[in-house]
Amino acid sequence: MTSSVERGAHEDAPDELRLPHGALALPAFLPDATLGVVRSVDADDLLATGTPAVVMNAYHLMRRPGSSTVQALGGLHRMSGWSRPIITDSGGFQAYSLIQRNPRLGSIGPNGITIRAEDSDRKYLLTPEKAIQLQLSYDADVAICLDECTHVDAPEEKQRAAVERTIQWAKRCRAEFDRLIAQKRLPEERRPLLFGVIQGGGYPDLRRRCAEALLEIGFDGYGFGGWPLDSHGQLLTEIITYTRSQIPARFPMHALGVGHPANIVACAEAGYTIFDSAMPTRDARHGRLYVYTDEEPALTTTGSDWFQYLYIEDEKHIKASGPISPWCDCHTCARYSLGYLRHLYKIGDSLYARLATIHNLRFMARLMAILRERAHAG
């Protein structure tokens, strides 16, 4: 196995990933395009914000529009008009969330995850092999192994069982990935990467057990698995940092599902370099916009006073003639006033969702640029 990780100035720390659809500079934030679209914006909008890549979901795309449709439309890149890298999540976390909400909708067994569609009687079986087959058929740049997700508060016995199953599934994913890559006879520059996911809840010994087993199997990168927040919504900083310490620095690590700006900074400090979440785009649509508090924000891991939320519905914005932020260079801030955006929001026009999403994504892209500059300076 060879890796397409490009080493950075620090010998072991990668500062970019070379992927089939272009280089991904690290650290990077990827908005969630779960069903093949970042809601309210198109590929050109994403490019204009400086978004370098997106995350799509193999399980959800298997259901809608269906894997045969995705292939008929030329794969995810051609279907969505997005020419840059795409990471595909296996769907393990989404299946876990669905089953947690309603156990009647599915079950997890040794062979995979069985899920009943919420809107029909149809059942789907997502096995480790199927997860890899789907992701490679979609022409993903980075595929992620199927894993058994748990809540951090789940008992140790359940966490241990999930770790052992995650390891077994990772072995099957690795074998299927290698088989398909050999079958396709892809040249090195066209070969996607494969990431394993480290489970173990809040138990350091289980995180270590999972990390060591996945390292022995061998992957191009690794992800922090499981919900990254505690019951109070606080980042699980200690276990996240510990998990990163179990993986050599030469491997990139993906903080799966981390999207709050302050949490990203904390995870970046711990050594994570890939982040994804639907939070910034969802917040935008729901009227919560991100604004730096200074032209050159001083990022800290001990607080979040370097940025603030602007709530578009506040009455004080009714006649505001300036942009969302005087320091933002996005299309929205360059052309539209805050008062106009509030008007669009209040009348429910879809233009608001597009313009707000563009702004929040530009905020995230600038945050990543600041983190890259800081890493290079250090």
Image: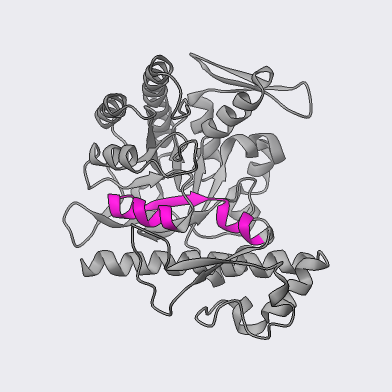
Task: Give the x, y percent position of residue 9.
Answer: 19, 62
From the viewer's perspective, is 150 left or right of 63? left
From the viewer's perspective, is 190 left or right of 312? left
The answer to whether residue 1 shows anywhere in this view is: no
Task: Give the x, y percent position of residue 301.
Answer: 33, 57
Outermost residue, left direction? 11
* Residue name at image x 56 percent, y 28 percent: 96
- Residue 138, by quadrant, is top right
Please state the extent of the stretch shown in magenta in the rendering: 262-284
Looking at this view, is 212 or 309 the one in front? 309
- Residue 253, by quadrant, is top left
Main SS of residues in magenta: helix
- Residue 147, by quadrant, is top left
- Quadrant showing the C terminus: bottom left
Asked whether 266 falls inside the magenta stretch, the response is yes
The answer to whether residue 230 shows anywhere in this view is: yes
Looking at this view, is 369 or 36 the one in front? 369
Asked whether 140 falls inside the magenta stretch, the response is no
Q: How many marks?
A: 0
Looking at the image, residue 65 lies above or below residue 310: above
Looking at the image, residue 343 lies above or below residue 8: below
* Residue name at image x 53 percent, y 80 percent: 329
